[in-house]
Image (tube, helix red, strand yellow):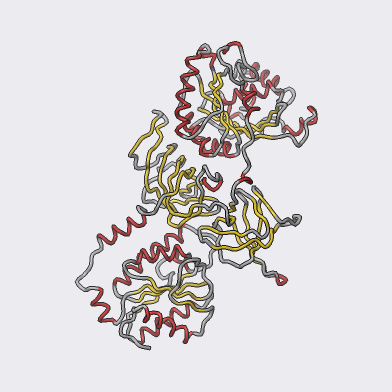
Amino acid sequence: MVRTADPTSQMSNNGSGSNREQMNVVIVGHVDHGKSTVIGRLLADTGSLPEGKLKQVQQQCESNARPFEYAFLLDALKDEQAQGITIDTARCFFKTKKRDYIIHDAPGHIEFLKNMITGAARAEAALLVIDAQEGIQENSKRHGYMVSMLGVKHLAVLVNKMDLVDFSRERFESIRDEYSEFLERLGVHPLGFIPLSAREGVNLTGRSEETAWYDGLSVLEQVDAFTKPEGNAEHDFRMPVQDVYKFTADQDDRRIVAGTIDSGSIDEGDEVVFYPSGKESAITRVEGFNTSPRTEISAPYAAGFTLTTQIYIRPGELMCRKGQSLPHVGRRFRANMFWMGRPPMVREKNYKLKIGAANVSAQLADVISVLDASELSSVQGKQQIDRHDVAECVLETLHPVAFDTRNNIEPTGRFVIVDDYEIAGAGIILEPLTEEDSLFKEEIKRREFSWERGLVTSAERSTKAGHRGKFVAFVGKFHSGKRNLAKAVEKHLFGVGCQVYYFGLTNLTKSFESLDREARTRSIEQDDAVRRLGELARVMTDAGTLFMTVLTNVDDYDMEQLGMLNAPNELFVVAVGETPFSQFKADVELPDHPDLEEAVQKVVEGLTKKEVLIDYSI
């Protein structure tokens, strides 16, 4: 919502050019600590208001018998003035001799913290306002954390309303020391603390006699002292893959990998690696739509690339440049997170984690500590994350994701959590963790520890049936012939007396369809289907059955998970045609649409070689 005239319409009056440097600055703080007054006074004192705006607002206040406030220059909407709080993130503009500024006025009320994050996410620098009389409040802490979380490197703290404490140096220094200690724990080092009376204009555009003891910068001088952050183009290359486009018209057989470059640059001929799959290729050409040909491209542009080899990758992978630092790939990491959802974040519940272009299901594995903003301290041992909590926690994803730590490459070190189709949490990744104590492994341990067995042993079942229980998965692309093969193998083995069962994935629930069709992106439903299928296989193979099914939309990690879920029984994989595997090795590999009779024989030979079929000869 633009509250003042667009600055581009005023540049010609001051002789400014369109090549002037521009900076986005967010102003945050607890409700009623004076953010809007700071901005309104800045606009007025720098001559950045539309002509007659100041006089108009003053006359409106006079006609309504209300005392004039500089905040009214911003709070132009009736509902905002009536409530006395800023709800939306307002944008306004002003300029100095050095550069042009876009100021984002973020709401301070606790109910509108989502809006605050929206404003802060665009910012290159921040001003955080604290009321000298009220002191540090809950949202002073929360906003400090969120500025840190969003990677805003340049921060100045404005201790406002100093006139209400008689410009007390002791009061100012007390707030400065206490808040500096808190920011230090977040790894944030503010560029300065400024004693201020925005309403009176003290230390706003120049230093004032009322604070003769202060020898630092004024607000305007501090804003001009902010430096533009280093561009992401200087970092190692990262591009989340948003989609893969295939062309078939006019003998065009290109497969274009597309996305928006988060950091770094890349040239034609550079070798690339995709994570978490680990698949490699090289750039043949930089593609674009209605653009001039180019041989290199860098952040933050959207781009497409054709590769030297037609590798099978999915949207959500992270494209990296070979030879540069590699991202972390894993299922567990320690993070700082802010929770905005109305229901608390709890353990043993699946959420959707979005990082880059990847969407995976995730669970809360551990709550290390929660910031109690009202007590300005950390709470240990809390078992859930409540609304508006700032927490240090451990998250575990069901499927591996590629990521960086926030201090390394910022865009790929941030994530959001979706709960019931709404963004409920946002955070930064602090460090990767090993999977030794993963929720997944612990769940399997608990299951096996409490598994109740009958009087018939697995060895007795194998001796009677002539084979061991086995989960046999036929894997390949859609319409590769794997389904007909699986059914033919079932029929053949049944004919020679085996206890065998072919399981159609949609027999019980449609959720299994996600494993039986081509899919462009991964979903929580697919992760859930892998889990349910593995548990079902565990029961069927424990009963001594040759349990068979077909899988289309799976990769290395799905097969690893199915193997763990089916343990202690084993997994036998038949790959038909091209598969998305990069490391997983199938037990039997066949071409697309193989000859049915020959393929059945090869599968049976493979089962015999693995000693699944005990006393069976072809």
Residue 217, given in percent of the width and then of the height, sits at 61, 21
Q: Residue at x 50, y 67 (%)?
A: 581
Of residues 58 and 329, which is closer to you in this image? 329
Of residues 145 and 279, which is closer to you in this image? 279
In the depicted structure, whether residue 502 falls above or below residue 553? below
Q: Is residue 55 left or right of residue 156?
A: right
Q: Residue furthest front?
A: 323
Residue 29, given in percent of the width and then of the height, sits at 52, 28
Res 231 → quadrant:
top right
Residue 446 visible to the viewer: yes
In the depicted structure, whether residue 401 falls above or below residue 42? below
Residue 143 visible to the viewer: no
Q: Is residue 585 left or right of residue 218?
A: left
Q: Give the quadrant of the C terminus.
A: bottom left
In the depicted structure, whether residue 538 falls above or below residue 370? below
Residue 526, given in percent of the width and then of the height, sits at 46, 61
Q: Residue furthest bottom?
A: 618
Res 209 → quadrant:
top right
Residue 612, given in percent of the width and then of the height, sits at 34, 78
In the depicted structure, whether residue 356 falls above or below residue 94? below
Q: Residue at x 66, y 60 (%)?
A: 269
Q: Is residue 116 left or right of residue 54?
A: left
Q: Give the quadrant of the N terminus.
A: top right
Of residues 200 and 209, which is closer to you in this image? 209
Q: Residue at x 31, y 67 (%)?
A: 568
